[in-house]
Image (cartoon, grey):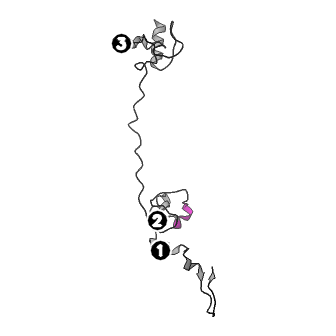
Amino acid sequence: ALAAATAAGAATKGVHVQQLEDFSYVACAPFCKIEKASHHCSFCKCQGCGYCISPPPPPSPFAPPPPPPPVACQSALGGDFGYKTCSPFCKAAKAKSHCSFCKCQTCSYCVGVTLPSAGAAALRLPSTSPDRLTAPLPAKSGAHPRRV
């Protein structure tokens, strides 16, 4: 009786304990009955039956909520994102310039930083337009503009 009680206790904990005239592996033999689960589930040959298998634990009620959606952001800065974040590119040592980028605006060192207007930020960027790639030469007849 002590061996059966030990086996039954172990079976409810998911531990395989082989009893006399039992299988050496977990199964669900044809003789296993749900009406006799309290006894049959102590045998390896019944521990594989659905009524002997413990259900998985319920999901934690304290699962973290999903992150909020990103906040939309617009800038005229080349290579910038269309939403606010704090990307690995951002550096606290360069907060004055990096905090102008949408991709740096949620960094802790950018919170509370006064940002220049988008127009002012755009004026500081080098232009790549064709008219900015040439500079006029001193007035000479027949002179062609030079590349800078």
Give the residue at mark 1. 120
Q: How far from the left and from the top, in percent, is residue 28?
A: 45, 16
Q: Mark 1 belongs to which amino acid?
A: Ala
Give the residue at mark 3. 35
Q: How far from the left and from the top, in percent, is residue 137?
A: 62, 88
Span shown in magenta: 69-97
Foreground disc of the pair 2, 3: 3
Q: Residue 13 or 135: which is nearer the viewer?
A: 135
Going 39% across and 31% down the picture, which residue do you hit? 58
Residue 139 in the figure: left or right of residue 108? right
Mark positioned earlier in the residue sequence (2 or 3): 3
Question: As displayed, is residue 6 above or below residue 65?
Answer: above
Q: Mark 2 belongs to which amino acid?
A: Val
Mark 2 crowd level (few <14, some 14–19, many ≥20, 10 Å Cα): few
Mark positioned earlier in the residue sequence (1 or 2): 2
Distance in Å between CA atoms under marks 1 and 2: 16 Å
